[in-house]
Amino acid sequence: MTTAARAPLAALCRALAGFLLAIGFWYLMRAPYDRLLANAGELLLRAVESPPVTRLTARGGEILVARADFPPAAPQPGLPAADLHFNVAILAALFALDRHPLDASRVAALLAAGILLFLVHVVALAFDVRSLYATGLGPWSAARYSPLARNFWAGGFHFYEVAGRFAAPFAIWWPFRREPDEPSGGGGRPRKRAA
Amino acid sequence: MLQRSAPPSRPTRSSVLFLVRFGAFLLALYLVLAVRPVDAAVVLPFTGLVARSSAAILNALGESVTVAGTEIRSPGFAVQIENGCNGLETVLLYTAAVLAFPASWTRRLLGLLLGFIAIETFNLIRVATLVWIGSHRPALFDASHTILWQSLVVLCGVMLFLLWASRARGARARDTASGGAAR
């Protein structure tokens, strides 16, 4: 097999290895991540609602939604958290495509991309909760959300479910990607300049 | 003295342009697929085809499954093929990326056709595997369903796009070089 033919195969193997490693890391870290996401989502939702009444709690792989203006005994709907953020493994796999994924500059880029993806997760969670408010609470939803608002929140979250959660890691990775013939940034032999 | 252009001057502008076009195409394609008549006339029949093809694969492998609409049933397990399981979300992503990338229309159309076939073939393997897991290892079904297999199908779509884009870029470079040499 030629070197040119081996390069895509090697990249594919690195991506798969990165994906499997990331799945393992994600599995171990998802409970604390759920809590972080619930806190950040609650902060965002309370910043835009008046009065601020939403309370989000992570428990058992779900984000439980409560409102201060509902009776304390009211049921708390749970939103599956993994569906929101398992795409972190896709992001890691894309970064693993690089020939030197463990270079300091690549790890820094992965961390920066991870922060951007976290922001996407927070916004997606906010849409998920507002979609629940707009369409999932029967007469309470109908009395407070117009048809346009219901479509906006439910459509926004549906877009995330169908396309956004897969497109987000790709779109975040794209500006950080390095072409195969680009220098690795550190450690490697400096290239000669053409004269 | 000529110097090689410095690597840090990355094609930031072209990256941003690509992302803007990619986002616009993705949203437009999503809206087309989300419209109820398109869903009824295209997505549902296509999902039924995915269900029947997956069932044919499983039956050929010695399983005993039947299909009703978009539902696949085995003796101890039944699964409904829905949006997100028919591979169209990855086709959506792939199509938006191919349309957003600068290339000739012939190359784009060829890339879309081959990419669609490859993604849907991979998705058929996914659905057949998931039905088998649901029948024989039900405890593993949930994790395999979304997290593992859906991610793998999306990664397959992204890898296909990157392969197509590298070839499109190479063809463009050759065209530019031959155009320059002809002058």
Image (cartoon, rainbow, N blue to C red):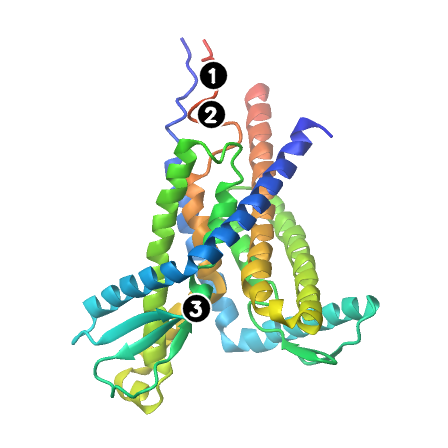
Identity of the residue drawn at 59% across and 67% down: B85
Q: Residue furthest left?
A: A51
Whichever of labels 3 and 1 marks the residue nearer the N terminus, that label is 3
Callouts 3 and 1 in the same chain = yes
**Quick check: marks 1 and 2 in contact, CB under 8 Å?**
yes
User: Element type at marker 2?
Assistant: loop
User: Hey, which quadrant is residue B168 in on the image?
Assistant: top right
Q: Residues within 10 Å of mark 2 (few under 14, many from 20)?
A: some
For badge 2, the amino acid type reads Pro
Whichever of labels 3 and 2 marks the residue nearer the N terminus, that label is 3
User: Where's residue B181, x and y in %?
Assistant: 58, 19
Closer to us: A175 or B28: A175
Q: What number is the disc on residue A61?
A: 3
Closer to us: A81 or B179: A81
**Quick check: marks 3 and 1 in contact, CB under 8 Å?**
no
User: Hey, which quadrant is residue B134 in on the image?
Assistant: bottom right
Callouts 1 and 2 in the same chain = yes
User: Element type at marker 1?
Assistant: loop
| Chain letter for mark 3 | A
Nearer the viewer's eye, disc 3 or disc 1?
3
Q: Which residue is mark 2?
A: A183
For badge 3, the amino acid type reads Gly
Q: Residues within 10 Å of mark 3 (few under 14, many from 20)?
A: some
User: Where's residue A150, x and y in %?
Assistant: 34, 79
Q: Residues within 10 Å of mark 1 (few under 14, many from 20)?
A: few
Q: Residue furthest bottom?
A: A139
Q: Which residue is mark 1?
A: A191
- Image side of residue B86 versus residue B30, left or right: right
Quadrant location of the C terminus of chain B?
top right
